[in-house]
Amino acid sequence: MTGLLMTIITRDLLIQALDNVYGKKGMARHDIEELSDFVLSFFGYEDYVLDNMLSAAERDVFYNLEEYGLLEAKREEVNIIRGKSWRINQWTYKKNNILKAASVKEEKKASENPYDDIFKAMDGNQ
C-alpha cells in the first residue's frame, strides 16, 4: 500500500490509462492527450482537487472519469467554531485503477482485418 501512495501519476501514465479506457471507445489520441493535460492541470503535484475549484462543465468531466473508476469523489466534515460543520468535497486519483488501466496490453484493433497477415504471407510466396 505504501508503494501505491508514493506512485506519481505522470502524463505518460495517465495518457496510457485514458487511451486504454477512452481509446477503445473511439476517442482520438489527440483528444486523449488533451484530456490528460486537462486533468493534470487541476491535480498538479497533489493527489486531490477541491471540488469548489471546478466549474459545472469541469465537474461533469470528473464525474465521467469517476464512472470509469479513474477518479473518486470524497467528502469530509470538519467541525468549526460554535459546533458548525464545514463540508469539504474533493476529488482524488484512484491510483490502483489508473495503474491497472495503463498496464492493459493493447489488443489487436477491431478495425484490423484478421486475414491481412494471411494475404501478406501469400503475396510473399508468389
Image (spheres, rainbow, N blue to C red):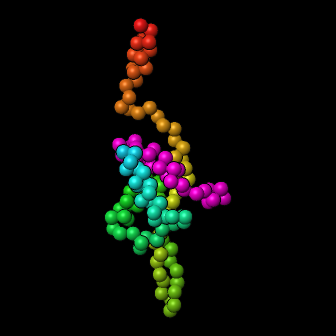
Q: Is residue 90 above or below residue 93?
A: below
Q: Looking at the rendering, in which quadrant would you find the C terminus? A: top left
Assess whether residue 7 is covered by the magenta stretch. yes
Q: Nearer the viewer, residue 99 or 35?
A: 35
Q: Quadrant of residue 20 in the image? A: top left
Q: Is residue 111 left or right of residue 84?
A: left
Residue 1 in view in this figure: no
Q: Residue at coordinates 39% horizontally, 21% vertically from top-left? A: 116
Q: Is residue 70 above or below residue 116?
A: below
Q: Nearer the viewer, residue 125 or 39?
A: 125
Q: Residue furthest top?
A: 126
Q: Residue at coordinates 49% horizontally, 46% vertically from top-left? A: 16
Image location of residue 102, percent across then percent down: 52, 46
Assess whether residue 116 is covered by the magenta stretch. no
Q: Nearer the viewer, residue 29 or 89?
A: 29
Q: Main secondary structure of the magenta part?
A: helix
Q: Which residues are magenta?
A: 1-27
